[in-house]
Amino acid sequence: TRQSTFMHSLHKRTINDEERFVFNVTSPFLNNQAETWGIPNEVIEEIHIKDGFKSSFNSILEDLLPGMSEATSEDIFTSESYDHGQIYDTMHTIPFLMDHLFNFSKSTNLGYFGCNHELLYLMDAILQRLEHSGAIFVSHDLIKSVSSKLKPLSSRCFIVSSEEVISKSDIFIFDTSAMHLPQVLKFNGIPFPKNSFEYRDFKEKLRTSFLECIKAERQRYNTKQCFLRKFLIISSVNTWFEQLTSSLLDTTLTPYSSRIRHGYIHIDSDLFASRKVDTPELEKEKHIGSSTYNLPDKFWKEAVCFVKKFIMANERLIGPKEVTRIFKCISYSYPESFLEDIDINWALIHKGMLSQINFYLLNHILKTMRPVFANQVFIIFTIRTDIPDISRKSEHYKNFLERVYIEFY
């Protein structure tokens, strides 16, 4: 009672006012709270306990899924199986996906970005059994590559533009499935997507849709429009899509075998924040020698020292995040290479991180920029013409081109 609170003020407290709360009461309703208390404008779902078993999650799955042809199944999670996850077992994955959707409101609208028509059919059939009344919005930009194979979807499914999916959905589902594309067998018969134009086009469209979705969700958050929407990511672990999603979403580290990661946008990520000139404190920090940043080895330090020798304050650079924080100029880490409007003067390409770089940006670098430095780890490109080129016959440069060919072609 050392503070004069609402409960302890001599003149304001009303807790024991019998005139107000007993004798002068004229109605059992609090009219001044009628439109705000609780959730007056929401439909409350009724759950009938006695009928619960008929619509239970387990029984629906038993009715719709054929069961396993063998007692067990297995998969491999190693560096050699990178991107194999895009060829997954839909029947195995659908229960883990539906486990997230089972307890959402029946009016929830789902947004699907992907090409797995089998998963779409199963998801739609299960939701019908659950008496789901919401819509399923499917991105036309992605599903059109398999539209000729699609059976008619139910009346709850709408194939629309990506913009409409983003604006109308309450939950987003991003599916890396590449089963509709040509495959190649490696490592004792393990299938992988074949590195074809169709595959690269699919990756770019999925990547672009995801970034558009992130931008829209950040805008909603910044303008305080509604709650954050959930992201469900199908089979991204140990694939090219994992690095992008993990940098922009706060995801739960679910087991690889479930094939499902889920989460919400990472609020603290500054990937889409407007870039401004650094403060004097940050500029002072960036002038500190590269050794302060504990670069991995001498090859990294060689590359950094070379760029620091030539780069100007108004130039833009892309490189690994361990490198970009060193420079005074505007710099982008590899995850930011997915931005379509990126404009750079320097590119520090780490040979072991090619999978993190946007293919179209890398192709642009090879066509329009000049290689001016090479060692065992890095190739450095620039648009500048006052720095001598390296020899295209250099072993380091030839090794880089071989890695590009293996990764993208």
Image: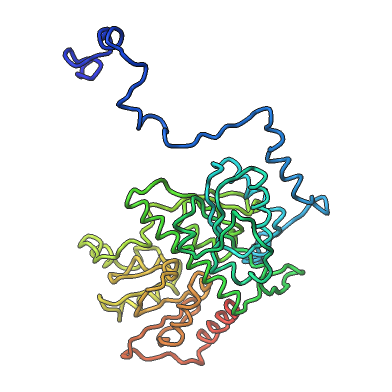
Picture coordinates of residue 245, whole percent (x, y): 50, 59
Is residue 366 shown above or below 303? Answer: below
Residue at the extreme left: 11
- Please count the marks in the image: 0
Q: Give the residue displayed 57% in from the left and 46% down from the top.
A: 133
Q: Answer left or right for 82 relative to 272.
A: right
Q: How is the image coloured?
A: rainbow
| Residue nearest the viewer, comparing 235 with 298 | 235
Where residue 392 appears, as percent x and y from the top left, is 49, 91
Quadrant of residue 131 within the rendered picture: top right
Identity of the residue drawn at 58% across and 83% down: 402
Q: Position of residue 247 (x, y in %)?
A: 46, 59
Drawn side of residue 14 relative to residue 249, left or right: left
Quadrant housing the N terminus: top left
| Left or right of 74 on screen, residue 310 | left
- Residue 197 is drawn in which quadrant? bottom right
- Could you tell me which residue is drawn at 59 percent across and 70 percent down? 144
Residue 14, position as x, y percentages in the image: 24, 14
Quarter of the picture holding the C terminus: bottom right
Q: Residue at x 60, y 77 (%)?
A: 198
From the viewer's side, name the closer residue of 161 and 7: 161
